Amino acid sequence: MSGGIDSSLVGLLAVKALRKQRVFALMLPDSSVTPGGDTKDAINLARNLEIRYKVIDLKKIKKELVNKLPKNKMAVANLL
């Protein structure tokens, strides 16, 4: 769930179709590029829908992956 219109609508439809107890929102922002407001919006939506959620910041994970890739611009560009 990103906090945008599309994922917000999907979250609402999932709750209506499946009930809130069966919906889990996963938020995967990259704090180096994702505006903080977007993550806050996603969290607020999950709370308003009363669904469980988890936020995992991908910034450190992406950095680790880049360090493991060959020193190749194309390999790094495909990750980012």
Image (tube, rainbow, N blue to C red):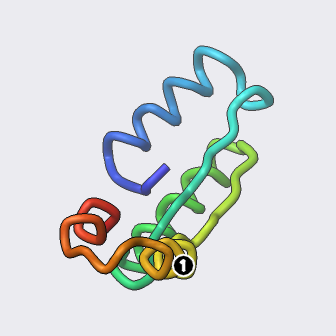
Residue in the picture at 71% in, 43% down: 51
Residue in the picture at 23% in, 68% down: 77
**Most distant residue in the front direction:** 70
> What x and y, as percent, mark residue 11?
52, 36
Residue beneath disc 1: 64
> What x and y, as percent, mark residue 19?
71, 22
**Most distant residue in the top direction:** 17
Q: Quadrant for residue 30, please give it.
A: bottom left
* In the foreground, 12 or 33: 33
Q: Determine whether 22 is above or below 4 in the image.
A: above
> What x and y, as percent, mark residue 28?
52, 60
> What x and y, as percent, mark residue 31?
45, 81
Q: Determine whether 77 is above or below 1 in the image.
A: below
**Most distant residue in the right direction:** 21
| Label 1 crowd (10 A; few <14 / some 14-19 / many >=20) | few
Give the residue type at disc 1.
Glu
Q: Quadrant for residue 32, please give it.
A: bottom left
Q: Quadrant for residue 70, please give it.
A: bottom left
**Most distant residue in the left direction:** 74
Question: For this view, does 80 lie left or right of residue 63?
Answer: left
* In the foreground, 10 or 57: 57
